[in-house]
Image (cartoon, coloured by chain):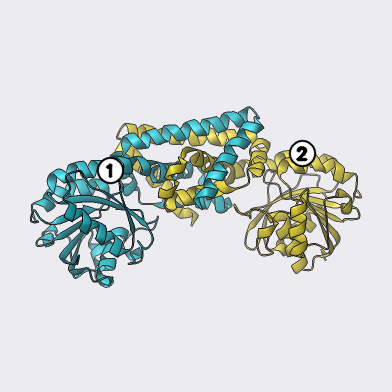
Chain colours: A cyan, B yellow
């Protein structure tokens, strides 16, 4: 059994709201409470009847045996000490932050029973208004324990995510941040830079290619600011790698080097086909 | 009436095949013939019963009163003189090439009755196997006449595209190539460079962001080689602009300049929202 007595979800946007809905649907918690800084978010949560209780006040985490931190990365780090003062030492704590290294190293010192996780779900859609119990179905959740993480707690977190519908994979926080810098942070960087490069008056000419490549540039800027800064070194390495590849393509075009261009496009195309 | 006696479509891939199907459906031609270099393409076209006649031999264009060039840009330019030798001077000729400046300047010297067009339809899907008479519905077709283009011919081409289901817009070939370098060629460049930057072994971790941003990197490399080289100067300018924006974002991350990063992401986000 992994049923919890009281689950507190801190940050009830798309991810936090969807976790709560999923826990409720699967009957994994006797009580679920939600905390948001924003009154408007709490109003929507109440209307959607997602939580048993909702508040702007952190105090309602008291008595929880599972805390899920689902705010942007910088807020997770900022709130952690205040939450630690309100819950017992044996309370299981996890987060869903998009970078893991900074969070795991800080929060494992603050919470005796902390395990980082990152469900690779979500979209450019934001907010509890879009939350859905089926958001995680078929997705992958990366879990990043430390060597001294209690085995039983790890087993509970793994079971929790599987119940919610994700596959699970254990990686170190460092591996996680390196891999995500390639497959998620870099695509977001290029989407933002692309959008910065398109004059407003030409938007009306956009066909599928611009729409697809920049869809994620509509993602919340505060979340991505926080991701880029909390994974700064890896993100900077990936930008440099991308710039080298872009420069190579630019030089080949400048040189009319059809053989070289074709080779680059073809290798990109084949790799993309493998992604399908 | 814009009904044609004999329409010849040269290059019967996704676009050429879809035009033929649409002309047939709308009953805009008494006879439609298709030409492809590839025997396998002709076999599929025959199976789909798209053309009245199909051949690898250019000679079947003889007697056409409308020729539609729908091969990659470099092939359009290469085939034009051979086609001109087979058709009467009053035959209306158009193309669907993705760049217009080189094509319009060369083909208007070869064909007395040439008007360039570019339907902004299509996708990373290729080939006549995916062709569909509804491909153009609701899309935009840019038409690029010269000052001395006969008014009556222009009117016929406009009516043709509207019948096929596109809106139409008249631009100079230079304007077309400049705008498309922003909204189409640059996104393709960054998608190819992104895919070049992702290690194969990390593809299995890709969530929606990488999939969306690189979908078009699965596009045929010969078509894009030809587009980049035939619009070289504009494409190079857009790569430089994008690189400057990427470098600015990189520098702001390096400097932990949260105000600057937020401003850039937010301006990108707002512009993307306007695209919806």
Please give the name of the residue rendered at 24% of the width and 41% of the height, measured from the top-left corner: A102
Judge depth for marks 2 and 1 and give the one in front: 1
Give the Cα distance between marks 2 and 1: 58 Å
Where is residue A77? Give x, y as percent: 20, 46
Where is residue A81? Give x, y as percent: 12, 48
**Residue B50 in view:** no
Q: In this rendering, would A236 be left or right of B143?
A: left
Looking at the rendered structure, the secondary structure element under dot 2 is helix
Chain ID, mark 2: B
Number of residues whose C-alpha sits closer than 10 Å to that of mark 2, classed few (under 14), some (14–19) or many (20 or more): few
Please give the name of the residue rendered at 43% of the width and 49% of the height, measured from the top-left corner: B204
Looking at the rendered structure, the secondary structure element under dot 1 is loop
Return the mark for residue A172: 1
- Disc 2 designates what residue? B105
To the question of a shared chain for discs 2 and 1, the answer is no
Where is residue B217? Give x, y as percent: 55, 46
Return the mark for residue B113: none
The quarter of the picture where the N terminus of chain A appears is bottom left
Q: In this rendering, would B25 be left or right of B197?
A: right
Front residue of this view, candidates A71 and A91? A91
Chain ID, mark 1: A
Which of the 4 image quadrants contains residue A268?
top right
């Amino acid at each position: 059994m992994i049923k919890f007595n009281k689950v507190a979800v801190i940050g009830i946007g798309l991810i936090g709201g969807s976790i709560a809905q999923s826990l409720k649907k699967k009957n994994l918690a006797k009580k679920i409470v939600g905390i948001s800084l924003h009154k408007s978010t709490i109003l929507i949560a109440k209307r959607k009847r997602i939580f048993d209780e909702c508040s702007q006040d952190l105090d309602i985490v008291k008595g929880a045996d599972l805390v899920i931190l689902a705010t942007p990365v910088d807020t997770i780090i900022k709130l952690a000490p205040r939450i630690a003062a309100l819950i017992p030492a044996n309370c299981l704590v996890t987060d869903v932050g998009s970078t893991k290294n900074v969070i795991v190293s800080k929060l494992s010192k603050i919470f005796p029973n902390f395990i980082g996780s990152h469900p690779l779900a979500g979209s450019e859609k934001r907010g509890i208004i879009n939350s859905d119990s089926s958001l995680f179905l078929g997705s992958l959740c990366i879990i990043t324990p430390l060597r001294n993480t209690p085995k039983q707690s790890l087993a509970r977190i793994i079971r929790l995510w599987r119940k919610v519908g994700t596959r699970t994979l254990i990686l170190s926080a460092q591996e996680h941040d390196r891999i995500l810098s390639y497959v998620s942070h870099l695509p977001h960087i290029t989407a933002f830079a692309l959008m910065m490069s398109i004059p407003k008056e030409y938007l009306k000419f956009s066909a599928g290619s611009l729409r697809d490549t920049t869809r994620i540039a509509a993602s919340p800027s505060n979340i991505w600011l926080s991701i880029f800064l909390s994974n700064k070194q890896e993100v900077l390495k990936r930008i440099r790698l991308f710039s080298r590849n872009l420069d190579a393509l630019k030089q080949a075009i400048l040189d009319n080097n059809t053989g070289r261009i074709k080779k680059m496009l073809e290798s990109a195309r084949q790799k993309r086909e493998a992604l399908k």
